[in-house]
Amino acid sequence: MCIFAVILVSSAMTLYQNGKALREEGKQVEAMQAFIEATHSTTDDEALLGRVYSNMANMCRLANDHETAYTVYEISATHFAKTDDTLAYAYALNNMAWEQAVMANKEQALALVDSAVTVYPQEPLLDKVIETRAAACLFREEYDSVLYYTRQTSNDYLLMLRAQAYSYLQIDDSATYYAQLLLPRMTNLFYLDDLYYILTHNDSTADKETIRVLSSKRADVQKAIEARHGELTQAVQLLQQDLAPKEQARVWKTILLWAIGIGLLIWAVIIVYKQRKLHFEKSTFESTRRNELAQNIQIVRNATDIRQELVWKDFPALCRQIDKRFHGLASNLLAQELNEQDIRICVLVLLGMSHKEIAEMLNCSPKSIGKLKDLTARKLGISGGKLQDKLQNTAIL
């Protein structure tokens, strides 16, 4: 099993390295194919997958497809987040912030930048963070803020942002100064258009020889740039075709999770409703039974002759009357192995009769009634003082 895992990781690494080499050779489509194959190699190396997706996102950025770039940088960040490489994770967050900045979503960009700094609050990230903050301001046309972020730097890209800010503010001599400073050392072909614009528009003080050299340089690389951009566009289309099923799966997964969540919520509401309804019905039922019990107790106690009302001398007839009046009380007590005397004691206690009244009904001494009650209560597993409550509850249920 371990050997198989090593083979998978090795295969993914080979594809990744091959993709990087193809990128450097300018073979963008082949590079993207190699990166896509690396992501499908079922490797569990999160750091490797993070690097693969980061390279794919870089290609999207160069093709000016910033929405796709943001999505792929986000995937890269999710992989790096599962590793101990906090710098790589912070860079991924900063790259996400950069794409938001380019799309003029300054607030989202700055929030992501803050997250990146929280993850890795030191160099070399901090220099990149300043670039992102400055770019977020530039794309929102907040040029004074760009000048603030770029006030002390030797970073070529920050100097480019500073030149652009001066140009947009029509401070042409400063814009020209930084553009001429950058021209001899500019290696990024995609920034040549920005330099050319600064040096040929408005009231630039650039000399003709500088502009001629720049124009010549632009002409030499223009075809290469166009070809590279065309390759990048095709590569991004490959990536989008690969991401589409994953995005659909993610959407369906989200829908399924929402459906499960809503289903559980509905189920919980139904359970709570049923419990409350059951509680209400039970409370209503008990209330009705208590009223009936009180009425029947009152009827029996108000009878001219209680003995005649309950057919006291005939025990079977007495039990039938008790069951009828008090919802099967006699049968319930007999099932708990109470004898005839116990049943008679229970009926009189339920009626709320005093020891003297019970003694008269049973033709015995009032002093013996307390002991008889206690003996009966013990058979029911309670004390004599709780016998009446127990009988009432039994008669209700």
Image (spheres, grey):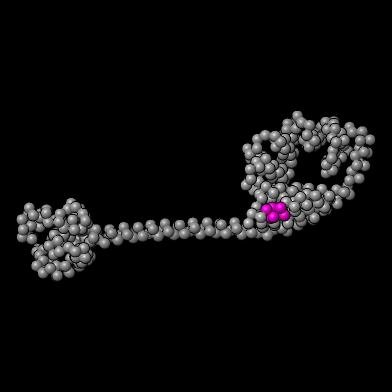
Image quadrant where residue 138 sits: top right
Whether 211 is among the magenta residues is no
* Residue 311 position within the rendered picture, expressed as x and y whole percent measured from the top left: 11, 68
Left or right for 351, reference 235: left
User: Viewed as shown, does residue 332 lie left or right of 21?
Assistant: left
Magenta span = 6-11
Seen as rendered, the residue at the extreme front is 3
Q: Is residue 223 above or below residue 150?
A: below
Residue 13: percent from left, percent from top: 72, 51
**Which residue lies at the image location 10% right of the left edge and 57% below the top edge?**
358
Q: Which of the two residues, 15 or 352, is positioned nearer the viewer here? A: 15
Viewer-proximal residue among 263 and 290: 263
Main SS category, magenta section:
helix
* Residue 351 can be seen, yes or no: no
x and y percentages locating residue 248 in the rendered image: 65, 59
Q: Nearer the viewer, residue 168 or 313?
A: 313
* Residue 361 drawn above or below residue 220: below
Q: Residue at x 82, y 48 (%)?
A: 24
Quarter holding the C terminus is bottom left
**Is residue 217 at all visible to an observer of this figure?**
yes
Quadrant (top left/top right/bottom left/bottom right) for the N terminus: bottom right
Residue 6, horizontal then vertical, whole percent: 67, 53
**As drawn, 136 above or below 361:** above
